[in-house]
Image: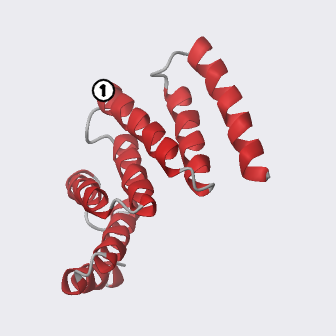
């Protein structure tokens, strides 16, 4: 009920923003991401992943590969792929996001720590318990 209403509303807003602001405008990309998240939350993983990919591609082109918003898009795409069961690709993207966040934001930044926790959870799901445990320790000792 409510998710489908939210998706419909976000799609209407997205259409207006694409028309008035253009497809690469930050406000348009924010709404595109909201649609992708809502679709994923509803279990429509394939369309959610497709929209996350669009948002990531646009942010990489307009903001650069290591801009914080681009890295957030990368993490969101990895999370959606994880939810979809595409664990190897999710792991690859989550590692990319973590590496870039450590370089650009620092190892103690909240976004970096969230990426450590997400990667640890993903590695656990993949049966890579020892690496997951090491990452969990890193996140746990953060201030």
The residue labelled by disc 1 is: 61
In what element is the residue under mark 1?
helix
Compared to residue 84, the image places residue 127 above or below, namely: below
The quadrant holding residue 78 is bottom left
> In front: 98, or 131?
131
Q: Nearer the viewer, residue 73 or 142?
A: 73
Q: Relative to residue 106, is residue 53 depicted above or below?
A: above
Check the picture and name the quadrant holding the C terminus.
bottom left
Image coords of residue 110 (percent x, y): 40, 64
**In this figure, what is the number of numbered marks?**
1
The colour style of the image is secondary structure
Is 26 on the left-hand or right-hand side of 58? Answer: right
- Residue 107 to residue 11: above or below: below
CA neighbours of label 1 inside 10 A, class few (<14), some (14 to 19), many (20+): few
* Residue 15 relative to residue 25: left or right: right
Residue drawn at the location 37% of the way across and 69% of the way down: 118
Residue occupying the point 58% across, 35% down: 31
Position of residue 77 measured from the top left corner of the image (x, y, whole percent): 40, 49
Q: Residue 19 is drawn in which quadrant?
A: top right
């Amino acid at each position: 009920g409510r998710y489908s209403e939210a998706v419909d509303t976000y799609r209407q807003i997205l259409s207006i923003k694409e028309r008035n602001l253009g497809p690469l405008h930050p406000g348009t990309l924010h709404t595109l991401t909201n649609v992708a998240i809502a679709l994923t939350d509803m279990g429509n993983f394939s369309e959610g992943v497709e929209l996350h990919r669009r948002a990531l591609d646009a942010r990489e082109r307009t903001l650069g590969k290591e801009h914080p918003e681009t890295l957030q898009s990368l993490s969101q795409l990895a999370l959606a792929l994880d939810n979809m069961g595409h664990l190897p690709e999710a792991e690859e993207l989550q590692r990319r996001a973590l590496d870039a966040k450590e370089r650009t934001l620092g190892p103690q930044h909240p976004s970096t720590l969230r990426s450590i926790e997400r990667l640890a959870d993903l590695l656990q799901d993949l049966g890579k318990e020892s690496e997951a445990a090491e990452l969990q320790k890193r996140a746990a000792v953060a201030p």
